[in-house]
Amino acid sequence: MFFILMLVILLAGAASWAVGATWLSIMAFRESAGRGFAYLLIPFYSLYFGSSRWPKTKTPMLILSIGFGILILFILVIVPFGFSYMLTHANSRPSDRAINANVLHAEVAFREVEFKAKDGVLLSGWYLPHENAPAAVVYCHGLFRSRLEMLDRAEKFWQAGYAGLLLDFRRHGKSGGELTSMGFLERLDIIGAVHFLVDSLQLKCPIVVHGVSMGAAAALLAAAEDSAITGLIVDSSFLSFDDTIVHHAKTWLGLPKFPIVDELILFTKWRAGFSSEDFDLRRAVQKIGDRPILFIAGGADTRMPPEIAQALYDASPSTHKSIKVIENASHGRAFDNDQKTYTELVLNFLQTVDEIYGSSNR
């Protein structure tokens, strides 16, 4: 419905501008010795001709000015508001909505679970139990995806002895929720998942959060807020909400920051209820302190290039931090590009977490 309204506004503005401009041009050719094309380019044409050269009938000027105003309103307000609406109402792409337990390997133990985010949103996921697991891993997918994005990783690390929880973020997969936010609101989903493991399932082992892209950003924000998260695997995160929106608008659409992208950022912050400081991941990583963090980046990632992982690594005060760039991997595809290296990297990290925190349930 919103996009139909956008189209109606655009057509109304274009039609008003076209009618007014055409009418003025015809009159101007008649009254101003063939100078009518100026009216097509300068709606407030008194700046060009002066009031003495206006056509005697002011109605076409009014129509043209209304149309021009509607088009400016559309470009500077409706378009960024529309992009903000799409961003905050994003959900899983069709292939990621087809969530069926048949995709799990037969030997993998699992059960369908539901739990609530910190703010009460009902979430859905798969819990992969493992007796005497040295750690449990919460797997967090990216924007437009679902738990299916992280399934191969979860199965591989389950086979190595680690319990796992694959969740669908709000408005994704089978989970509820009204808004998505690129990670700010999703941090509450992760906190809810962690406390589901700790409080409802009574797990005593360390809890590690493994996120990709939006999931990685949400993981950093969640860990900055909740000390129950004992370790983080941060794959292809961005630096901040502002930074990633500006970067993607320039890369994909060729848009400068001012004015449309600035307005998109402003509208989205207003919708989701956060500030630039709230969604600055360098600030978040500093709050995490000395907890273990593994940063992963794809060497061929143009969306969140390795320099971002390096900046987050440099900002972290942890003495248990590490970073790895998987060569030739595009955005979020480091695991697919080099499963052997990725698996060894994560298993070594999980062993480090176990050595630091131990596991009282074994």
Image (tube, helix red, strand yellow):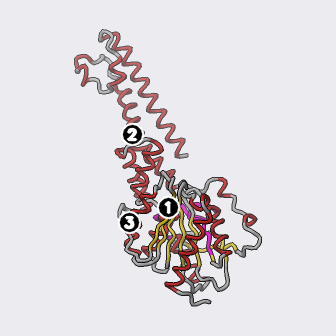
Is residue 132 visible from the viewing direction of this image?
A: yes
Foreground disc of the pair 1, 2: 1
The residue under the point 56% across, 66% down is 140
Residue interval drawn in magenta: 164-188
Residue receiving disc 2: 73
Q: Amino acid at mark 3?
A: Arg
Q: Earlier in the sequence, mark 2 or mark 3?
A: 2
Q: Is residue 235 magenta?
A: no
Q: Amino acid at mark 1?
A: Val
> Which of the labelled discs sits on residue 89, or is there none?
none
Q: Earlier in the sequence, mark 3 or mark 1?
A: 3
Give the spatial CA distance, label 1 vs label 2: 44 Å
Foreground disc of the pair 3, 1: 1
Figure quadrant of residue 24: top left
Residue receiving disc 3: 282
Q: Is residue 170 magenta?
A: yes
Residue 204 horizontal side relative to residue 238, left or right: right
The residue under the point 55% across, 46% down is 1
Q: Position of residue 100 (x, y in %)?
A: 72, 63
Q: Position of residue 214 (x, y in %)?
A: 51, 61
Foreground disc of the pair 2, 3: 3
Q: Quadrant of the C terminus?
A: bottom right
Give the spatial CA distance, label 3 vs label 1: 19 Å
Figure quadrant of residue 226: bottom left
Q: Is residue 41 above or below residue 231?
A: above
- Marks 2,3: beta carbons within 8 A: no
Q: Earlier in the sequence, mark 1 or mark 2?
A: 2
Give the spatial CA distance, label 2 vs label 3: 36 Å
Residue 28 horizontal side relative to residue 2, left or right: left
Residue receiving disc 1: 325
Circle 2 Cα neighbour tier, 10 Å, few/some/many (<14 / 14–19 / ≥20): some
